[in-house]
Amino acid sequence: MMKPKVLLPIFRKFKEHLLPDWIIEEISAHMELKVVYDPDSLSSEEYDNLFRDIDAMISTWEIPVLNPRVISKCPNLKIISHAGGQVRFFIPEDLFDLRPDLLICNASNVMARPVAEHTLMMSIALLRNLFFISRWAAENADWENYPREKNVSLLNKKVGLVGLGQIANEFIELARPFKAEFHVFSRHLGDFDAEARGLKKSSLEKIFSTCDVITICSANTPENRHMVNRDLLRLIKPGAVLVNNARGALIDEQALCDELESGRFSAAIDVTEPEPPAMDSRLRSLPNVFLTPHSAGPTPDQWPWMVKEAADIIRAYFRNQPVWNIIDRKRFRYMA
């Protein structure tokens, strides 16, 4: 069988992190790989011409927007596999109309696991008040008299998930050994499916008023903007933990800061609106906020995994094997 011709446009600034030599060698063993560096240096015509005789494409970060009219005239191109999550920035939605046969996939499961890991880490760290207790240990000679009420376990606690995408599902699997009770708000979760999976379908109000950990996992769609509003934030019980590794726009940030100032609960915030937050943002100074710089996703040592995953999907396709992480129009619209 002939090797499929695969185009891989990438910026040189990402080459070391995304495309080490071992990845190129591994992909080239199964595909006729054409790597194009710094695609923004090409004219529109030159970029469009790259697609004329290829069978597949591995897309990477920040590449130029595809021209749907051009792609519609490239019948050999059967699949685009993205070495990342979000594809909206380079795929216009009308491509689904012009090339309904074109498969679009991504490496979102590779990205979801590290985010779920970060969510679990932050949930435990904030419940245990590790940052406060570490300072206490450094500053106090009388270790035995630390505030014991600040040391809380995740075991057997109520965990609320706002949204049930790949990150939420990965988090559930990571947290199951803690015998947590999972309460889920999702417009796509039926009662039967929830019961079969050991989940409790819940309302936002119940999650925010009763859960010990609340993690935001919804997609950043227009209808979800500020879905976590002041009314919900006021329901959070004392000692609870809020984790947002999804998108900053899902939470009314001013309302969040106002409620955090009460000291009633703590929050781990990896995403903000805008991003980064202003230097005078209260998120930077509140003592009950653990702020991270959108770092919950794959760590640098894991970045090549995304390219490998994208290539594995293409390899499966041309071997007539099932492919995964397919992005149809519905998923395209609600993706984070």
Image: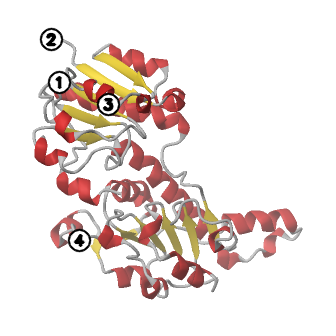
Q: Residue at x 31, y 63 (%)?
A: 164
Q: Nearer the viewer, mark 3 or mark 4?
A: 3
Q: Position of residue 282 (x, y in %)?
A: 65, 74
Is disc 1 in contact with disc 2, using a CB cutoff of under 8 Å? yes
Relative placement, left or right, of 42 versus 255 is left
Q: Residue at x 38, y 63 (%)?
A: 217
Location of residue 270 (image quadrant): bottom right
Q: Which residue is mark 4?
A: 187
Q: Which three-letter amino acid code belongs to the residue tagged 4?
A: Arg
Q: Residue at x 36, y 46 (%)?
A: 85
Q: Position of residue 120 (x, y in %)?
A: 50, 58
Instruction: Estimate how packed mark 3 is, as few (under 14), some (14 to 19) or many (20 or more) residues with alpha carbons within 10 Å.
Output: many
Q: Which residue is mark 2?
A: 1
- Whichever of callouts 2 and 3 sits on the residue coming sooner in the sequence is 2
Q: Which three-letter amino acid code belongs to the residue tagged 3?
A: Ile
Q: Where does the C terminus fall, quadrant-wise?
A: bottom left
- Whichever of callouts 1 and 4 sits on the residue coming sooner in the sequence is 4
Q: CA distance from mark 4 to mark 2?
A: 45 Å
Q: Which residue is mark 3?
A: 58
Q: Which three-letter amino acid code belongs to the residue tagged 2?
A: Met
Residue at disc 4, secondary structure: loop
